[in-house]
Amino acid sequence: MMGVIGMALNNPYALSFDGVDDYVQISSNFNLNSDDFYISFWAYLKNSSTYQTLISLGYNSSEGFTIITKSGTNNIRLFFNGAERFVTANEYIDTWLPIILHRNGTTINFIVADEKFSMPYSGNIGNFDFILGKSGIASQFYLNGNLDEIIIRKGTYFLLEIQDNINKYLSEDEEGLVAHYRCDEGSGNTLIDSSSNGNDGIIYGATYVNGSVDFKTKFLDVATLPPTDVTYDRMTLNGKLKEIINYPTVDCKFQYSTNPEFSKLNNINNPYALSFDGVDDYVEIPYQSALIQDSFTIEFFMQLTDKNQIQTFIDYGGYGSNRWMIKRMDDGMLRMIWGADYLNNYPDFSLNSKQQMASIVRDGINVYFYVDGELLHTWSHANDALGQYNLILGKRSDNNTQFSEMGVDEIRIWNRSLSQQEIQNNMNIQLTGNEPGLVAYYRCDEGTGNTLIDATGNGNDGTIYGASYVPGEAELELSDNVYEIQETEPQTIKDTVLSFDGVDDYVDIGNLGNQTTIGTIEFMMDSKALENYNNCFTTNFAGGDNAIRFEENVNGRFVACIGNSSSHLNHVYTNSLMVNTIYHVALVWDFSSNNVKGYLDGELVFDESHSYIPSNMSDVQIGRGFNTDRYWYGNINEFRIWNYDRTQSEIQYYMNKKLTGTEEGLIAYYNCDNSNNDETTLVDLSGNGNDGIINGATYTESPENLVLPITFSKTITGLDNSKPYYYRAVATTGGEVLDNYNPYSLSFDGIDDYVKVNSILVKTLEFTVDLKVYLDSSERGLNKRAYLIGQNNNGWQGYGLGIFVEFETGRLRFEWADNSSSDPGTVSYQLTTDDYDEFLNFVFSRDTSGVLYIYKEGQLVSSFQGNTIINSTLDYTIVGGHFINSVQNSYGKHMLDEVRIWNRTLSQQEIKNNMNRRLTGDEEGLVVYYRCDRQVNHGVLIDSSGNDNHGVIYGATWVEN
């Protein structure tokens, strides 16, 4: 099955250098002189009082380059063509950091972690040996640290593409790949080039250590829309591509099947197993006639320790007639006791190396014992030995001895004898619970409590005596061999930008009338070269400075130049503009108060007075800016002109989103996607008819991070009208299939349902709680509360955290109290009728000054100055249920989904960015992440953050979204 999401890729090793004499030498076959290229790698620097060379080609030659640390510090320097070009402001010690050297045309870009540098370039690069860990001219400047994932690649690439790739494994046949050193051999003196170009290196002294860099996939946000055109033998599948992350081309497709389970993800979180201490721990499953019959199969994952004592790991009545047990003897022998008979021992039995699947099968005559699907032993015995006894795991039941020290997981009991092939097929998959003949199924994933839940729904729950939960080790998948997944042909969705060559390309918009008193201009831009007087836009080309213009210079200065026939002023966005880097630029003006504001990537960079007001917008042009020249070399996208002064929140919310064109206040909107298939016309999508004439500029694919509200569909025919069909939309890029399938949410009945987490999730002064909630309108006006998140079972009177809905008053409340306050800090939001009966995103945050905030769908709706004390008396967290001493009215009917808690205060822009996308689980500051996407009617609310803050579900059920 396809659809693995967000898996960390295996990166077992890195190459370690001792700082004394370790290095790697690679004979040069790179020939980098005539091509654009980039070199990227990960580095881990240890403290040193001398120079350290990371990589070198020609060292200090006028035709070489070296990346080296500064003497006595851990600042990183780039020497290029014989001279020092850049020095990082920060020192880097004892941390992994990505480093990129990028030549694109006449520009050199250098990136170390979050520090970025750019400069014009001219010169040559010679064919020197490529050296890792020391300078290229002498045995000096050795590296004391580690290197990993070294990539050398030719071709023209956006910096965003390069930065994206540095976090991912590249395949061996990537276009332009010159050499790729994964550093994962683990031993030997050869550093393998996995590009298949044969540029292997020789290792001198450097050794392999465990790798620490995680390389991950990224997400595409895809929605599945209802099917249309449904007849007896056909239907049209519909999907929506909601977000694209740094990919210029995406293939959208559908999966469909008659099996309703097909759309589950392959990887199943298996958080727990049961651990038995070998002293007095065991599990007892009460007798039921359906459990143990003449033919049966019992399976479970187990791990026995190699103790020199007898250990009974499964027992049915102990020793005597109509009973049986299987044990490991103190000499390592496996023994089966059937009735009063000791069947043959099997020698050299050991399960202590790792967790393995044990299967006991009786077919009415013989008893078979399998380990990991392989037949280990067969006992022939005709007597039934099937009395009415409880089934025991972990001890001998008739004399309460022979306790086992072991781990157990995934216990399955069948009322038939499975074949060896069935055992092997089921061994590494998580069952649904409704397989034919399955009479009891214990996933062991509750995480707490004394009841071992039967997932078949047959009610054969067991009782846990002493055994405790530990992290599970069984790697399970959902079965994909019981049905066929069919896929449609992919459809390709592309986004484009308008590219200008810097020579004679431009777009003539024409006359947009008088200069508006208030207004906003927004666009995405990507400069290809830093040159003096390059202008990407003007409102009055023929008027020179009597216009609003945007201009760069060779030193990376980018300004809005605004003036009239008398004079003009430059308002500076940045003095360090980088080429091949996408920026969002916004200019907001209110000439009635002589004020202009500039935003770069949504952040305010100037708020200044301005009195030289242009008279009109009579000659609007994109791609050039002053009388007869000043042409722009680069890309432009998402150009918008508004007739009002947009707020920073509006700019931030919409800057990475495609507009519909119907937004109020638009004078002109150019999304540059060539949807009309006309290479000569730039269409104004605002409906105002302000189309532009394209002169030379061309459409090219874009790597921009834009939200694309693009729908796509596919009609399939030849369906069997006697069967229901299930489907989902997915998106594919680079060979990976990614989706955001989230079929379930957690439903609370308003009577006694809740989830308990035996840890405190909010422990810091700063925090953010982000969740989606569905409030049931049938509760409106009732004297009830729906507690969404609470810490400390006494509510605010016990000085805790409470986020809850008062249905009687219709208020959503957010309370935080310290250890001694008699009254909490409280902020609330008055719900409207539109806030019920649909999922809405609400965010609750607290900053370092104690201010409490509530956001609804990304918009701030309420705030309050609270206290600044951290509560230290709390002991657990409640999700979705009771809070005040289990009082009945503290329950309320609602559903929860996508619950995230952070140990920091998210900005409004971060909240908006995360609002409609699934997280990976490893985001900075994420304490807990409940995706609520498991179709299991009992057990555990899984924390996908990796912090193991799993919750125990009491009554709440999974419902399909």
Image: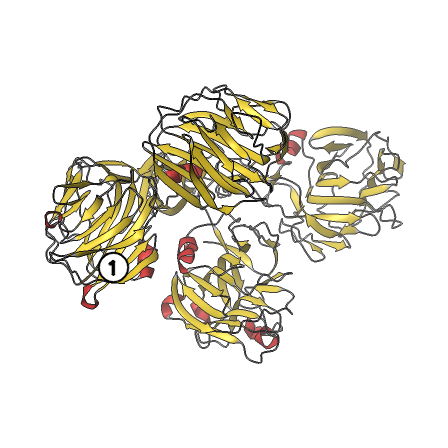
Q: Residues within 10 Å of mark 1 (few under 14, many from 20)?
A: many
Say above or below: 482 vs 533. above
Please provide percent x and percent y for residue 487.
Answer: 41, 34
Colour convention of the picture: secondary structure
Q: In the depicted view, which residue is nearer to us: 507 or 789?
A: 507
Determine whether, in the image, residue 386 is placed left or right of residue 721.
right
- Position of 503 compared to 565: left or right? right
Residue 956: image quadrant is bottom right
Q: Identify the residue shown where x is 63% and y is 64%.
A: 876
Q: 354 or 642: which is nearer to us?
A: 642
Res 499 visible: yes
Provide the residue designation for mark 1: 588
Q: Position of residue 633 (x, y in %)?
A: 24, 38
* 731 vs 826: above or below: above
Q: Extreme bottom residue here?
A: 822
Residue 11 placement (x, y as % from top left): 57, 35
* Amino acid type for the residue under numbered disc 1: Val
Q: How many callouts does the rendering have?
A: 1
Percent position of residue 760, x then y: 61, 62
* Viewer-side residue, 753 vs 766: 766
The local secondary structure at tag 1 comes to strand
- The residue lying at 47 percent from left, 65 percent from top is 844
- Towards the viewer: 21 or 50: 50
Q: Quadrant of residue 941?
A: bottom right
Quadrant where the C terminus sits is: bottom left
Whether residue 660 is visible to the viewer of this picture, yes or no, is no
816 relative to 666 in the view: left or right: right
